[in-house]
Image (tube, rainbow, N blue to C red):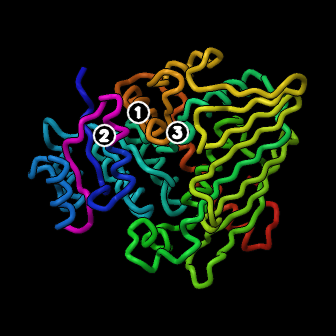
Amino acid sequence: MKRIRLGMVGGGEGSFIGGVHRIAARLDDQFELVAGAFSSSPENAKRSGEALFIAPERSYASWQEMAEREATRPDGIEAVAIVTPNFLHVPVARAFLEKKIHVICDKPLGITLAEGEELAFVLNESGCHFILTHNYSALPMIREARARIANSEIGEIRNVEVEYLQGWLNDRLELTDNKQASWRGKAQFAGAGAIGDIGTHAWQLAAFVTGMEPESIRGKLLTRIKGRELDDEVYAEMRYASGARGRLWASQVAPGYENDLRLRIVGSRGSMSFRQQQPEILEIHPLHGNSYVVTRNGVNNHDSVRHQCRTPAGHPEGYLEGFAQIYREAAVKIRGGNAPLLPGIVEGLSGMRFIETLRASSDQGGVWIEW
């Protein structure tokens, strides 16, 4: 068995997320980066390819050329990682799927639900795999929470609360040379603001852990900073068929917060809470008895969760390992194995539907809209 030959679109000089994906792909030694179209700037693309030790003939000036040429090589890439601004996710994914190349794509799925649905058709016809890198759902303690809820440890779910708070866009960084902020501030490149960038993470996490999607939602997209083109804060309420209720709050204009993603699940016999900035622990609050914490790779972990831990208990794992787990399971799936917890096109479409449904509710004054 050889390493899977990997290409990358985007992620060149000055990119944050491209480096994250490259580290994640290498961590378990299942992938080898052999080709790329690392930037829309030919000069940046060339420098990036050289810095990453890519053979000159496989460092491409465009992703279109890369898809065409790699598909005809006997040693062409087997999978491509897409780490571009959102507006390119679907066009790039489509081009490689049509060439029978598997896709690993950063979230969200794209710009609109309609283009996502078109991609789902292409994916089905291709026979390939599409993996969406919702990395937080691959953290061990999140999967521990999911397993315990599936085993009815906290009883019937009554409340689901999830929030993701950042403060980095409290200033108008999109007007500066900040590469991460500049494209996120424009609808033509990002499609949506905070709701797409971090709101979809919160949405997917709540659905993943509980195994539930609501029957109706309502909410409001806000633009707190005057003159900004896109939303920078979002509130949502969810009603579930079981009678459970949910709330979601995502903000990129919460001063003092960094990447504070939190999840609380309240059940009839207990509750659970998780904070991404403390990824080694899951808090359990039973109806009777003392509250306690479950630690990553501890004695009480679910077997399935313990098997994904890379270091002994007490040696922290977190953000990068979450991405690495996505890549590890992507390798399993590409090789024909089973990876049932791996997010893909279904989760991508759900995220796009969340954006569009909540936007419609907001435009209508916060009315309830059926899911």
Residue 345 lies within the magenta run: no
Identify the residue position indicated by label 3 in the image.
343
Taking the spot 66% from the left edge, 76% from the top edge, the residue there is 224
| 250 in relation to 336, above or below | below
Does 369 sit left or right of 146 as displayed?
A: right
Does 87 sit left or right of 70 as displayed?
A: right
Taking the spot 21% from the left edge, 53% from the top edge, the residue there is 66
Q: SS at mark 2?
A: strand
| 107 in relation to 303, above or below | below
Identify the residue position indicated by label 2 in the image.
79
Span of residues in magenta: 23-42
Taking the spot 34% from the left edge, 46% from the top edge, the residue there is 81
Q: How far across and down, in percent of the image, does residue 206 sit?
A: 68, 43
The disc, 3 or 1, on the residue closer to the chain's N-terminal end is 1
Instruction: Say if residue 124 shows up in the picture.
Output: no
**Separation (CA) of disc 3 from disc 1:** 10 Å
Identify the residue position indicated by label 1 in the image.
330
**Separation (CA) of disc 2 from disc 3:** 16 Å
